Amino acid sequence: MSSAVPAHLRYTRDHEWLDGGDVATVGITAFAADALGDVVFLELPAPGRTVAAGEPCGEIESTKSVSELYAPAAGEIVAVNEAAAAEPGLLNSDPYGQGWLFRLRLTGTPELLDAAAYAAFTGEAA
């Protein structure tokens, strides 16, 4: 299901996306969801937890593997997507919408890729 990389988001090389300003919504990219296969379980970080950029903060389990979920930036987890935790398949069906994972109050300026750089990194269309 190769889909275009949304231009309004920012990306990590670990295949997470961020949207927003001081409080950013975080998810995984369609590229990551495709690579994982059918997602069957999510372990999301608890609200109130402080994370460092690149720190493992949860897990995504699919029919193929278990993968770490990394914090794309430093900050405090302020909300998690309970709907995605209850229905992990949302990561496959709507990774840039209903399949968001958590909201992060940023405490620094993250080093992220724009859509064109992420598309070049993964070989996808921007």
Image (cartoon, rainbow, N blue to C red):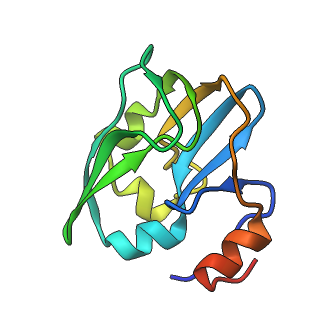
**Quadrant housing the C terminus:** bottom right
Residue at figure coordinates x 40%, y 37% from the top left: 83
Question: Quick one: which residue is furthest to the top in this view?
Answer: 48
User: Number of labelled discs?
Assistant: 0
In the picture shown, does residue 111 fall above or below 57?
A: below
Q: Position of residue 40 (x, y in %)?
A: 23, 56
- Residue 107 is left or right of residue 95, and the answer is right
Q: Where residue 109 appears, x then y in whole percent? A: 73, 35
Establish if 4 lies above or below 29.
below
For residue 125, what is the image quadrant?
Answer: bottom right
Q: Nearer the viewer, residue 2 or 104?
A: 104
Image spot of residue 77 (x, y percent): 50, 23
Q: Position of residue 9 (x, y in %)?
A: 73, 54
**Does the rendering let one see residue 3?**
no
Residue at image x 69%, y 28%? 108
Where 14 falls versus 81 (above or below)? below
Going 56% across and 63% down the picture, which residue do you hit? 13
- Residue 25 visible within the image: yes
Work out whether residue 73 or residue 6 is closer to the camera in this orientation and state it. 73
Residue under the image location 50 percent in, 23 percent down: 79
Picture quadrant of residue 37: bottom left
